[in-house]
Amino acid sequence: MTRRMWTYLLPVLMLCVLAWGVERFPPPQFESGHQVPQMATPLPRAAVWDWIDTGVLFAALCAASWLALKKRNRKWIAGLMIFSLLYFGFWRRGCVCPVGAIGNAALAAADSSYAIPAVVLAFFLLPLIFTLFFGRGFCGAVCPLGAVQDLFIIRPMRVLPALEAGLRLFAYLYLAAAAVMAATGTMFLICRYDPFVTLFRFDGNWNGWVLTASFLAISIFIARPYCRFLCPYGVILRNLSRLSKWRVTITPDECIHCRLCENVCPFGAISEPSKVLPLAETAENKRRLVVFIILAPILAAAGGWLGWTVYPMLAKQGGVAESAKSLGIKLAIVAGVFVGLAAAGKLIGSVIGRRQEDYEARRADCFACGRCFEYCPREQLKRKQ
């Protein structure tokens, strides 16, 4: 079709789009002066759009995995990230979101009378399945929450590993609290306090805009703070990515230890080659490991006691029904034990590690963003060849 034909067709197509939104049957005119009230909420979308969104999510996950593992091109990954931000963020208005679907999944697991919508279940499971096989491509190129933060990475600062491990406990705590509150019917905590939904929908109160602006401002210096330290869905993805069959590799063949990948990664996800530790330090690490293993059940018990203590106060403020309080207390205890074991795992992981000879991207921490590809000399050499 020639350019001239498009010149005539485009105005016609635009008029068709505008005509589609015109009311086919205008409201009647009342002689008494009665005014037809405006719709307070948008009309529900057609069911076909739910499946279109699911198909777009599946295609985006396939593309993200292929671009990170085969194409190995940061520009294409960034392009997919922008598309996902526009589609799932601004066009889809951040809903359905795999992160917020945690609440639906928790409620469905606790309440047999609640039927989780098929599209919500698909959005919840698809990124988990892809992560189990291909790593965290969803985080790197498909999640709109991560994409909007990624655009603000300007002067990223390094976070000390010990501090980063401690800050990640907030994500475990957030996941546990959100699951308990959703299972007891208190609230969908993640959806209520989504830090970017105000931006995606261009509405919300002053507190919502302050929260959004705060996270974006922090993102300038700390890359993806919500993804790394608060995202409850990220907790699940992190642990699944440890088991992923395929993973992102920095270099296509051999590592020459240039450290360029380590310098360019804003997330601190590159681990350096293992060092030969002195005998004294090795013995000290063994003693710490024994102490941390003994401490694990103590931390689990402390977490369970904290959940048992705090939940009644939260239930009182949230207006939880009496019939759900007993279940809520049990779930709160389980959630507290979960957080306590997560803290113990962080301590144990600080003194043990896998032997490696090259610079590698840690499976749990790598967002599959592709930044390291562009800086690897071996990658550049391969592209020239």
Image (spheres, rainbow, N blue to C red):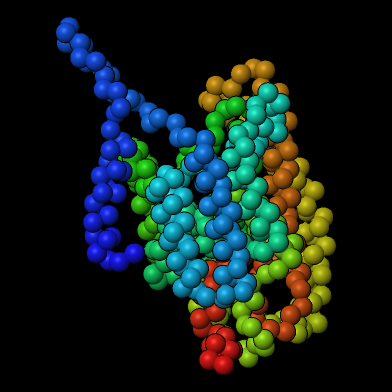
Front residue of this view, candidates 137 and 285: 137
Q: Residue at x 61, y 65 (%)?
A: 65
Q: Is residue 198 left or right of residue 140?
A: left
Residue furthest top in the image: 32
Q: Position of residue 334 (x, y in %)?
A: 73, 38
Q: Residue at x 77, y 59 (%)?
A: 292
Q: Is residue 107 above or below residue 365?
A: above
Q: Is residue 228 above or below residue 180?
A: below
Q: Position of residue 182 (x, y in %)?
A: 60, 33
Q: Is residue 14 visible?
A: yes
Q: Position of residue 340 (x, y in %)?
A: 71, 48
Q: Is residue 351 left or right of residue 181?
A: right
Q: Is residue 115 above or below residue 120?
A: above
Q: Quadrant of the N terminus?
A: bottom left
Q: Residue at x 27, y 54 (%)?
A: 9
Q: Is residue 60 left or right of residue 326?
A: left
Across the whole image, how many numbered discs are drawn on residues?
0
Front residue of this view, candidates 236 and 281: 236
Q: Residue at x 66, y 59 (%)?
A: 131
Quadrant assignment, res 271: bottom right
Q: Position of residue 291 (x, y in %)?
A: 80, 60
Quadrant assignment, res 51: top right
Q: Is residue 171 visible?
A: no
Front residue of this view, candidates 192 and 17: 17
